[in-house]
Image (spheres, coloured by chain):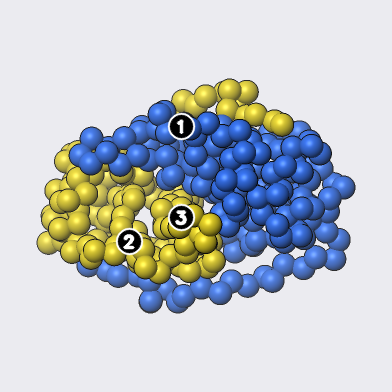
Chain colours: A blue, B yellow
Amino acid sequence: MNFYELIRRRESVRDYDPNKTIDDTVLNRILNAGRLAPSASNMQPWIFLLVSSKEKLEKVRACYKKSWFQQAPHILIIIGDTTKSWIRSYDGYNSIETDLTIAMDHIILAAEYENIGTCWVEAYDLKILSDAISLKENEVVFSITPLGYQNKGYQKLGKKKRKPLEEIIKII
Amino acid sequence: MNFYELIRRRESVRDYDPNKTIDDTVLNRILNAGRLAPSASNMQPWIFLLVSSKEKLEKVRACYKKSWFQQAPHILIIIGDTTKSWIRSYDGYNSIETDLTIAMDHIILAAEYENIGTCWVEAYDLKILSDAISLKENEVVFSITPLGYQNKGYQKLGKKKRKPLEEIIKII
């Protein structure tokens, strides 16, 4: 599967088999894709927090009430440390959100490559999530994703609704 | 080339052939990879600004003085419109930086797939960049990249300096 097929195939999965966990070998390959991601000044200011235990899953799931989110056997949270990320000298811009997003994109595309479903989730209650994972003051989260196999019979849409290229490209 | 090979191979290119521009067909495939990127609530709050003319390149290049950046025949800037991106109801978080970063990551990986060099650049002078492209008040930029073929004889490093997986994974 080439890169263009991969990104065409990836879409949000909202139906997970709760009983089918992911093998460590496969999980490692997926997380390693995040590890290899670039970050500003190569600071790698991240922790990949994989939530897999029944007890912790219960706590984390409370941050986002959708029923399909409750089914996923794993939830991945990328935690950033704002004291370890790069800061632009001109204006103090901190690269943390961009850094974490690149790593998450690598992970989500790697999961697709492994036939594992994901869904970019940002609509969580950050207060509930922070409490569930005991986020420290200097730590931040910008997106999380379930990781799991699709339920039998679940069909992807197989097409994307996107603006046409002419509408979003400007050449100067 | 599979996805894992692609991300292992991608690295910042800092030596471009100034005379070898990229064909429109190839550019379209690369930019289309950004078009297909997911964004919060599918808002697609972006413009892909491709700088290719001599006059505009000169203005934009002033935002980042490195000599290799002056050589690249194209510079891609993803512009976000903060009034068009998704906002989280709980706390007012605006997804714009995450949205733009996913699109840029897709574009950079697609370029690698096409054997075209890129480099995530965030260390620009935002004031100079904003003036060069007449950025409006509601518009933002978080990263830009040169797009171009490597100069003959340029060798990639071929290895990445990254923290070991054990150091960045936490399983709970």
Task: State the image coordinates of residue B102 (x, y, percent, origin top left).
Answer: 48, 54
- Is B78 left or right of B103, judged from the image as shown? left
Q: Residue at x 30, y 42 (%)?
A: A93
Quadrant for the C terminus of chain A, please: bottom left
- Judge depth for marks 1 and 2 and give the one in front: 1
Q: Mark 2: which amino acid? A: Ile
Q: Residue at x 71, y 38 (%)?
A: A51
How many discs mark residues in the rendered view?
Answer: 3
Whether discs 3 and 1 lie on one chain: the answer is no
Disc 3 from disc 2: Cα separation: 18 Å
- List the residue tagged with mark 1: A138
Q: Which mark is residue A3?
A: none
Q: Residue at x 31, y 55 (%)?
A: B141
Q: Which mark is residue B79?
A: 2
Q: Mark 1: which amino acid? A: Asn
Q: Tell which of B131 and B50 is nearer to you.
A: B131
- Is A42 left or right of B140, judged from the image as shown? right
Q: Mark 3: which amino acid? A: Tyr
Return the chain for callout 2. B
- List the residue tagged with mark 3: B93
Task: State the image coordinates of residue A24 (x, y, percent, origin top left).
Answer: 76, 33
User: Which element carries disc 1, helix, strand or loop?
Assistant: loop
Residue B126 seen by the camera:
yes
Pointers 3 and 1 in contact (CB under 8 A)? no
User: Which element carries disc 3, helix, strand or loop?
Assistant: loop
Disc 1 from disc 2: Cα separation: 28 Å
Mark 3 or mark 2, earlier in chain: 2
Q: Quadrant of residue B125?
A: top left
Task: State the image coordinates of residue A49 (x, y, percent, origin top left).
Answer: 63, 35
User: Badge 1, how many Cα within 10 Å: few under 14, some, many 20+?
Assistant: few
Task: State the image coordinates of residue B71 (x, y, percent, origin top left).
Answer: 20, 47
Q: Tell which of B89 and B84 is nearer to you.
A: B89
